[in-house]
Image (cartoon, rainbow, N blue to C red):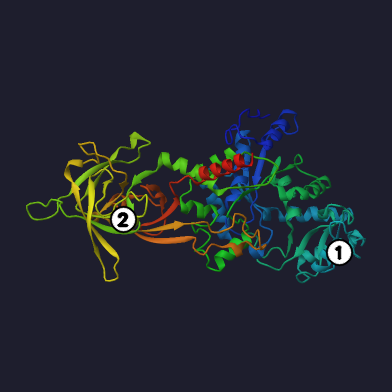
Amino acid sequence: MTTPATTPETFPGASDFVREIVREDLADGTYARVQTRFPPEPNGYLHIGHAKAIFQDFGVAEDFGGVCKLRLDDTNPESEEVEYVEAIVEDIEWLGFEPAEVLHASDYFGQLYEWAEYLVDRGLAYVDEQDAETISQQRGGYGAPGVESPFRDRPPVESLDLLRRMRAGEFPDGAMALRAKIDMQSDNMWLRDPVMYRIRHAHHHNTGDEWVIYPTYDWAHGQSDAIEGVTHSMCTLEFDVHRPLYDWFLDHLPLPYDRPKQIEFARLEFTHTVTSKRRLKKLVDDAVVDGWDDARMPTLRGMRRRGYPASAIKEFLHEIGNSRTNARHAFEAFEAVVRRQLNLTAQRRMAVLEPLRLTLTNWPVDEAGEPVVEYVELANNPENEDDGVRSVPFTGSLFIEREDFAEVPPPRFFRLSPGREVRLRGAYFVTAQDVVKDEDGTVVEVLATFDPETRGGNAPDGRRVKSTMHWVSAPHAVDATAHLYDRLFTAEVPGGSTGEPLDDLNPTSREVRHAKVEAALAEVEPGEVVQFERLGYFALDPDAEMLFHRTVGLRDEWAAIQRAQQKRGQQKK
């Protein structure tokens, strides 16, 4: 017997009732081992909501010395594709897990069919020749009784004959269905003679054209768990009402292993986010986003492109723990974890997103009349001395951020303006003297002088400046594109006011900037995240050349939200 883990490693210290159940089951001998599964339907790409299930399913197995298998719940041939299957495997690996085995619900179609005949033969299932709409209407509703099908009491031998003919492909789609015979008056709607098989003459990505009848989720799911030997079948809270049906099927079948136990936990929901596959697919189909891996999407592929570390997802899940109460978490809280991790690991570099030329009119030239090139040393990451320093070229022709200069400065503007002195990061103090404008009157160049005594960014006479600005040497600058992101949905709860989340789409969720960046950024590896000093953390796109996605800004929005909430609480008191 496997010894129960006393301190789970995946969520150390986190509140997690699921692990308590597993621990008790091992301690009292309900199970002598732990086996879990992650069973996504391959009809789209995995999203952040799936991440919680993945960490639960694989994490519980790891913590208790068990195994977790990936099972593709492929019972709807019209909507499933091999592309999604491959993506699911890759996304799980990105999160740091490797399935003990990759399986398909369709691998069990033969056994499921045999068990269907088993139930029919015992009068526990029957073939209903009514159409799907009629069957749905006859189920009634909450507080409204169900209506029994006129075919409910047909002899088992007759249902068995029809089921075999359904299997042989004699009937068109929708002509009939196999239903479990349970209780049409049950308060639980899922027990009102649920459909087990429906006719679908459709090509399947795994079984080809072998089958023309396909099992429903409820018929395939629990039985697949049983076939595989799953002990703990974890799913989100919306499947709580399915559990009596899950148990009913298992109670009436000759199982090859111990009966699995279904456990429901709260799903992961975020503000300003939609995780409905149907709605995400519409965003892709309508070209609202560039694809399933668009950096604004809550898909795992989109989040990876954006630069969110998989380890940050794990840490956030640890912080919120697990419960049986659904809650919507502030996305800013997750980004605070991302920011905290990247602060420790990301290399620092300088980039100018809206370039404005700064010319130092007193900058020296060499004997050939060419501007002198100096080099300043800057820390690669002040949080980690082992990352060392880098040499960055500095010249008399620079790029600064356009917003760092104001010809007529507003109140409390401490950056560069005529007559004002500022520090250039790691280099010199400079003072703006004049500007050059284009025909429209827009400033296109700032003329300034530098103080050669302030090399390194400090004045020997002890004078201080109120602003330090980043910069890029113009002759050494590399062109790059930066994508800046806002929330994809404007409302905290998309669709909260209209019922349709897509009504709350943010039309300005992405801004494109044509940047000038220091040459070291040309050496960044695809997918690597670096900090653009003063601007935020940016990930290099894995496919497009010199395209950077802003992962998160430097400002801790979650801390600001918490302070505001605390202030409101104090005011109420």
Q: Is residue 33 left or right of residue 424?
A: right
Q: Which of 167 and 8 is in front in this view?
A: 8
Residue that label 1 marks:
138
Q: In which quarter of the image is residue 20?
A: top right
Q: Position of residue 218 (x, y in %)?
A: 75, 53
Mark closest to the chain's N terminus, 1 or 2: 1
Whether residue 266 is visible here, answered yes or no, is yes
Report the quarter where the N terminus lies.
Answer: top right
Disc 1 versus disc 2: distance between alpha carbons? 71 Å
| Callout 2 amino acid | Phe
Residue 356 appears left or right of 266: left
Residue 555 spot, x, y in % from top left: 45, 46
> What is the crowding at mark 2: few (fewer than 14 residues within 10 Å), some, or many (at least 20)?
many
In the picture of the structure, the residue carrying the numbered disc 2 is 405
Question: Horizontal and vertical percent for residue 408?
Answer: 31, 58
Q: In which quarter of the image is residue 433?
A: bottom left
Instruction: Name the kind of residue labelled 1 in the image.
Output: Gln
Q: Between residues 312 and 94, which one lies in front from this camera angle?
A: 312
237 relative position to 484: left or right: right
Secondary structure category for the residue under label 1: helix
The relative height of residue 286 versus residue 141 in the rendered view (above or below) is below
